[in-house]
Amino acid sequence: MDALGQALSLLATGDTETWWTVGTTIRFALWSTLFSALPGVPLGAVLYLGRFRGKRALAAAINASMAVPTVVIGLFVYSFISRSGPLGFLNIMYEPAGVILGQSLLALPLAAAMTHTGLQKMDPRYAETLLTLGAGFWRRLLAILREGRFVVVQAVLASFGRVTGEVGVSMMLGGNIRWHTRTMTTTIALDASKGEFERALSLGVVLLAVALTVNALSHLAARDA
């Protein structure tokens, strides 16, 4: 209880490092969610609308990729952006851009899969009506996304929650550098290993609050869908 009290005190008194870490985590997560949703949501809609060879295989690959451990994603990206990698000239290793890239790739399959699954619950007559009226593929795609906007909101929220709580990618690609790439999860891992539980616990409280908020918003979107 004493540790929890000190943890809450760090949050209440506006401890600079604690809130900087929170802000950095949210900033990374927002950019990662954007860069994963921009291709992921349309990809999910294409899987719903499209009629093409290999569609089932692509959907299965996307669903399977969601189970890939975060450290594997981190290792994959590391091999490309490290100094000896083909993208080493970008110099984004141990930089915010590297973390955001890794987190975006981590969340992209989730955004696509959730969009695809959610749209399948829509009345199929809507898409059929658009086709009957002569709407082209891209117009149908935009109409489906507009009609399934709450599905899109759920996919985006799930992607945000996914990257906010991950640790493997952030640790491998960001290096857990203080005042630069340190996030809530990497700070918790570091402080807990050193026995400094107060800041770890305070950040755990914030992570829990973020998770509950995302879950509540997702339920609201599901109710309105």
Image: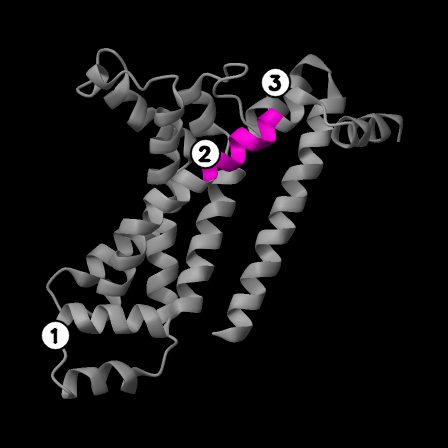
| Badge count | 3
Residue stretch in magenta: 20-29
In-front residue for pair 224/185: 224
Nearer the N terminus, badge 1 or badge 2? 2
Circle 1 residue: 136
**Real-space Cα separation, disc 2 to disc 3, in angstroms:** 19 Å
Q: Marks 3 and 1: which is nearer the front?
A: 1
**Real-space Cα separation, disc 1 to disc 2, in angstroms:** 36 Å
User: On the image, which quarter does residue 145 sit in?
Assistant: bottom left
**Real-space Cα separation, disc 3 to disc 1, in angstroms:** 53 Å
Q: Position of residue 184 (x, y in %)?
A: 59, 29
Left or right, 101 with respect to 15, comes to left
> Which residue is outermost to the right?
2
The quarter of the image holding the N terminus is top right
Dot label at residue 190: 3
Is residue 51 positioned above or below 75 on the image?
below
Is residue 49 positioned above or below 1 on the image?
below
Circle 2 residue: 28
Circle 2: element type = helix
The disc labelled 1 sits on which kind of residue? Gly
Q: Position of residue 42 (x, y in %)?
A: 26, 58
Is residue 45 positioned above or below 159 on the image?
below
Left or right, 163 with respect to 184, comes to left
Task: Give the residue at x 71% y 37%.
Answer: 205
Is residue 44 positioned above or below 85 on the image?
below
Mark 3 Cα-neighbour bin, 10 Å: few <14, some 14–19, many ≥20: some
- Asked if labels 3 and 2 touch by Cβ distance under 8 angstroms, the answer is no
Circle 1: element type = loop
